[in-house]
């Protein structure tokens, strides 16, 4: 019986590949956009403009505090009432990009705040402009702090991308739901879905680990 | 008190400057003028406002009232281009504050290239000369983490000189250093002073003060308590506070 | 969907939402405690020198981090019965959340411990403390402070993840919204209401983070 | 009207839920098919436009319709009066009912057995089976699942639930994925319930047309042919 | 070289000790014996192995070969209870390393209560006396962050004294301090030395060495290059390396 189900599953590999492809494409696009946007927001968040920083903070809280599913619903089903008509893919990208940007914004802000104030003062004292200070002095140093949690966050976001199946995109998770209708074995089907995500996410986790270790070595970890 | 007259304008000119941190009056009615090519040493107990004093000069701190005129421009005045003014002022920090992700040469050339818009090749040429001058010709491509404290501080000085400033400010440049490295930094500072730079130096290195300073300024609790030539100050301190201070730092 | 937005229906369903909220809160709370236990054990294994404990802990943490909670939930829900354990949904749900968050918490605690300056450990070694004394008296109290904010962050994640338990018929907050959506065909009302409740929980936890920060700030060092 | 729009667009947008055979499923080769799906395709053919399927979870179906992403809903949906307050249902095109099923070797042999206190009964969230199970088995422990009928069968097969309650056609269609004789399907129905398609109240022209369509296919036998193939027999199994 | 004889056993006894960090031989064939109640000052350029030397004594670093006998027990020998031995040795760090989450008094009483198992009331009583002795009677309940560097270091010394150690080790105890705070810490150290404590002190405070040290040991590149009384060492350094070193640190 299991074997027969397994064969039946194996037969669904084109669907599974399509799902995996959708997950990867969605994640790639929205993570790339989200990273850009997140860095921009993070820089503004620490930029010293109280009002702007407050507004960004409130938006980040709102996004972090509500279920992603609800955000997707709002973008896909409610925005049309305000004349913004989006197809499922675009809506998914926008929702995921926004989510990514909000998380990355906080990571970047934390990284920027971790750069010693003396570095900024040194740059200030040698007459570098605001953008030059950010670009030449602060960001390169913040990156060391930012990179490991950033990559870790990517993994979480890739997994969060499964929620977009609720608006009809056939990603890896949705393929699981489709296939389980024909092969009613939740354990087997979702185990394989898990394997699919593992293949995408594990290399990223390894990367995050390595980045972390490189930073740790540079900072002299405590030995117990 | 022996501040120079209020009428003529020095290179750095404090006139009745006050600064508060919250309720704390960290600079009290500071009046002090530094002439071109003059070297002034500032000393005083911890928390007396020495750092705050010199940080005001290039606008790292803002002042509450009074006037501060640097190189003929009023600091904090909206009409003053502070970024521009800062390029005329070099600042050396106690903790070096080298950019850890740049080599010694890159540290020295960063501002000349991006602020002064000097062509890279020319800036690097000048940077090498400067690094050689502070005795680090062989460390051009080393990163700060690969340098000793004394070497880092010498790079930091070269970094300031790279901008060809009119004024150099030093905030306890040797107090984070191992004793044997102090002299290598002081030697460089002496050389800079002897070339005629206008300098304000917060330091407790009395040997340095004796050697190059025209004036020593003693601060306590935010005010300038005493000021005079090094000989006057070290041999005949006028106030109890300066005597107590000198006895502490000269004893060991 | 918005022009006919019916607050009246929401009010009618409020008791259901309230029940769901209560369930979400207590089951998240229990899961979080479970996750702390799992996390501490995993972290302790991970800090051992020998690979015998480290390797399984690392493998577990990686596996959990690299796969979605949904797959883990079904793995437990459909997998345990095959091994002969038929557990109530709630128990499976709490187990899944604990095992999942535990992996993240293990990493948070490890980062907290590693953030303690080396000098602190050396000072305690030099005064003749044993490993456990060092951990108990010097390292953990300081690490605790560092880990509070990320732990509360993880609590927020856990609360939101608990929505997934509606899939295995646990009647929590999300479920209440789904009911409103499917009985009355009022999805906007259903989903916006649960969003509001989750936001409430989020701000609650955030306020807790601020308070605990202040409390730890006055009770402990400000260094 | 909406019909004009559809004609102009050249496309009929239909929201479906892939809740399992026989109504809506993805076949072995990844093609979308099933009884409801074929009926919708027939509709598009009669309109002379092409069809686009939008595939949602149960949660997404109604918002898709109400927000205008889809012109109509094709799912095995029971037109209750409460739901009718929000969407416009066609006249029913078939009748079915909820039934009880158990594992063949379990101690629950009849529908009556399931009335025992604490019996764990699996139902689908939001489906009419959920309401009926609550009414028929007041002392039982009702567990609502999401994700389609096959998961109910899986739950009963695994022992997470003692019995399941779901649409009889769905149970029959979906149990064929298991070896024959895995489940006992009770012969008696808990209820008799209609199934209907749904559209919006601001699309009266489409509603009228859909009713006309259902009339037509009933008269010319195409509806019966569809149901015989998908619902009343296993004939579909060899093709999909 | 003038190490005391190899036969009799001092309080601290290095015999041919070597230590490597990777390929770097940081301690080369160290032989050195410190008598009970003796105060030995260790100096030398940065990176010469001074810290490593004294860290070996309480096992913060492990040695590769040679013998190191402390208070009659062999360090690194499996038969030696290092935890027990460490309670006899106080260690004062350059960076204080006070426990930031404990008050001054708690810092002092933590180890006596948990390691020495002294009843809390008694330990606190003793702790107050010690804090009073280092001049901090009024800071008993302050947290480290509320104390100046000099005050923190004095708490750290009190923390060590609280264990009633037989030996006290100091690793550059004043080099992270502001100049005016140095003397308050040195005064406490002088007091401890005058009570007859066995001490090894890595420091460049030559005033302190002159005042209380019986011996000054000069290290370079991992080896003990010279050792003698302070007077001998400061007035007549025997090697070029020590002369060069002294000229650097005494010049300013
Ligand atoms: N950013 C700040 N906010 C609040 N108070 C400050 C700030 N910076 C300095 N102070 C306070 O202002 C006073 C003067 O500080 P300043 O750093 O100028 O002293 P200093 O003479 O340089 O001391 P040190 O020798 O320790 O460097 C001190 O009491 C200090 O605590
Ligand atoms: N944990 C370590 N790993 C590798 N090398 C080390 C380590 N600790 C110290 N060293 C190296 O060992 C040598 C001696 O170091 P040590 O800290 O004992 O010198 P020191 O004389 O105390 O110098 P300083 O005056 O700068 O404190 C140096 O070259 C140092 O770089
Ligand atoms: Mg200062
Ligand atoms: Mg050292």
Image (cartoon, coloured by chain):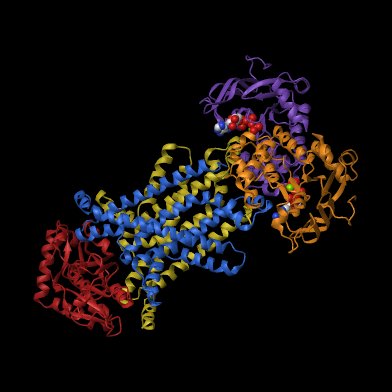
Chain colours: A yellow, B purple, C blue, D red, E orange
- Picture coordinates of residue C56, whole percent (x, y): 54, 69
Q: Who is closer to the viewer here, C18 or D39? A: C18
Give the answer, above or below, for where B185 lies relative to A213. Answer: above
Task: Kindly tell me whether residue D7 is visible in this rendering.
Answer: yes
Q: Quadrant of the N terminus of chain D?
A: bottom left
Residue lying furthest bottom: D180
- Residue B195, given in percent of the width and then of the height, sits at 75, 30
- At horizontal 38% and vertical 81% (from top left) the residue drawn is A2
Expressed as whole percent of the image width and height from the top left, the position of residue B62 reads: 55, 28
Q: Is residue C178 above or below residue B196?
A: below
Residue A61, image x, y percentages = 39, 47
Report if residue A17 is visible in the image. Answer: no
Position of residue B57 relative to residue C110, above or below, is above
Q: Nearer the viewer, residue B1 or B47?
A: B47
In the picture, measured across the screen, residue E93 lies left or right of residue D9, that is right
The quadrant holding residue E237 is top right
């Amino acid at each position: 019986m299991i074997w027969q189900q397994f064969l039946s599953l194996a037969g669904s590999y084109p669907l599974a590949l399509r799902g995996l492809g959708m997950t990867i494409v969605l994640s790639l696009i929205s993570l790339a956009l989200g990273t850009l946007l997140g860095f921009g927001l993070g820089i503004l968040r620490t930029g010293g403009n109280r009002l702007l920083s407050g507004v960004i903070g409130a938006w980040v809280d709102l996004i972090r505090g509500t279920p992603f599913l609800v955000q997707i619903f709002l973008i896909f089903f409610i925005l049309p009432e305000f004349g913004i008509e989006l197809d499922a893919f675009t809506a998914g990208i926008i929702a995921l990009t926004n989510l990514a940007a909000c998380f990355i914004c906080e990571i970047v802000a934390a990284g920027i705040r971790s750069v010693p104030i003396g570095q900024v003062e040194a740059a200030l004292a040698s007459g570098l402009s605001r953008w030059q200070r950010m670009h030449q002095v602060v960001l390169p140093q913040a990156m060391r702090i930012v990179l490991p949690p950033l990559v870790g966050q990517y993994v979480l976001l890739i997994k969060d991308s499964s929620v977009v199946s609720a608006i009809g995109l056939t990603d890896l998770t949705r393929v699981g739901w489709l296939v389980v209708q024909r092969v009613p074995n939740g354990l087997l089907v979702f185990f394989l879905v898990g394997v699919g995500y593992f293949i995408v996410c594990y290399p990223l986790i390894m990367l995050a680990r390595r980045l972390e270790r490189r930073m740790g070595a540079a900072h002299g970890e405590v030995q117990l | 008190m022996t501040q120079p007259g209020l009428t003529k304008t020095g290179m750095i000119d404090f006139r009745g400057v006050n600064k508060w941190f919250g309720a704390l009056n960290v600079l009290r009615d500071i009046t002090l003028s530094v002439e071109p090519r003059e070297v002034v040493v500032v000393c005083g107990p911890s928390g007396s406002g020495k750092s705050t004093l010199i940080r005001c000069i290039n606008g790292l701190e803002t002042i509450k009232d009074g006037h501060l005129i640097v190189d003929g421009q009023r600091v904090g005045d909206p009409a003053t281009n502070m970024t521009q003014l800062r390029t005329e002022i070099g600042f050396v920090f106690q903790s070096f504050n080298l950019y850890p992700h740049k080599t010694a040469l890159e540290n020295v050339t960063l501002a000349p290239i991006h602020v002064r818009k000097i062509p890279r090749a020319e800036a690097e040429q000048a940077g090498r000369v400067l690094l050689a001058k502070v005795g680090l010709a062989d460390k051009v491509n080393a990163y700060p983490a690969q340098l000793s404290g004394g070497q880092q501080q010498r790079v930091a000085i070269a970094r300031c000189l790279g901008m060809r400033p009119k004024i150099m400010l030093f905030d306890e440049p040797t107090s984070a250093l191992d004793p044997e490295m102090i002299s290598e930094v002081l030697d460089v500072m002496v050389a800079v002073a002897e070339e005629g730079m206008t300098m304000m130096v917060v330091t407790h290195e009395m040997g340095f003060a004796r050697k190059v300073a025209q004036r020593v300024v003693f601060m306590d609790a935010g005010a300038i308590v005493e000021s005079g030539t090094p000989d006057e100050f070290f041999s005949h301190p006028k106030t109890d506070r300066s005597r107590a201070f000198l006895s502490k730092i000269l004893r060991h | 969907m918005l022009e006919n937005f019916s607050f009246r229906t929401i009010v009618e369903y409020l008791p259901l939402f309230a029940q769901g909220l209560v369930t979400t809160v207590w089951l998240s709370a229990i899961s979080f405690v479970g996750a702390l236990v799992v996390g501490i054990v995993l972290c302790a294994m991970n800090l051992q020198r020998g690979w015998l404990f480290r390797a399984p802990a690392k493998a577990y943490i990686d596996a959990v981090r690299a796969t979605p909670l949904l797959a883990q939930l079904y793995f437990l829900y459909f997998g345990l019965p095959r091994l002969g354990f038929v557990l109530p949904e709630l128990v499976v749900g709490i187990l899944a959340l604990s095992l999942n968050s535990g992996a993240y918490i293990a990493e948070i605690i490890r980062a907290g411990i590693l953030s303690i300056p080396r000098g602190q450990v050396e000072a305690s070694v030099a005064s003749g403390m044993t490993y456990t004394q060092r951990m108990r008296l010097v390292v953990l109290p300081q690490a605790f402070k560092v880990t509070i904010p990320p732990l509360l962050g993880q609590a927020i994640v856990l609360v939101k993840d608990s929505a997934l338990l509606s899939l295995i018929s646990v009647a929590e907050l999300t479920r209440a919204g789904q009911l409103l959506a499917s009985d009355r065909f009022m999805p906007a009302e259903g989903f916006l209401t649960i969003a509001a409740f989750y936001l409430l929980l989020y701000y609650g936890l955030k306020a807790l983070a601020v308070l605990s920060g202040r409390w730890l700030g006055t009770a402990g060092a400000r260094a | 009207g909406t019909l004009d729009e559809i004609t102009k667009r050249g496309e009929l947008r239909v929201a479906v839920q892939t809740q399992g055979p026989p109504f809506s499923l993805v076949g072995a080769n990844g093609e979308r098919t099933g009884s409801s799906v074929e009926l919708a395709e027939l509709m598009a053919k009669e309109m002379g436009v092409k069809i686009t399927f939008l595939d949602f979870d149960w949660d997404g179906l109604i918002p898709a319709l109400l927000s205008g992403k889809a012109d109509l809903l094709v799912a095995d949906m029971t037109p209750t009066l409460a739901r009718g307050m929000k969407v416009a249902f066609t006249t029913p095109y078939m009748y079915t009912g909820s039934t009880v099923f158990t594992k063949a070797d379990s101690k629950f042999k009849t529908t009556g057995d399931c009335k025992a206190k604490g019996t764990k009964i699996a139902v689908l969230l939001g489906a009419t089976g959920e309401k009926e199970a609550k009414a028929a088995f007041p002392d039982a422990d009702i567990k609502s699942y999401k994700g389609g009928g096959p998961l109910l069968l899986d739950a009963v097969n695994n022992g997470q639930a003692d019995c399941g309650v779901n649409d009889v056609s769905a149970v029959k269609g979906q149990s064929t994925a298991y070896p024959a004789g895995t489940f006992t399907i009770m012969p008696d129905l808990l209820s008799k319930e209609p199934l209907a398609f749904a559209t919006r109240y601001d699309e009266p022209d489409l509603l009228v047309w859909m009713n006309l369509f259902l009339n037509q296919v009933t008269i010319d036998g195409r509806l019966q042919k569809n149901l015989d193939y998908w619902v009343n027999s296993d004939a579909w199994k060899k093709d999909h």
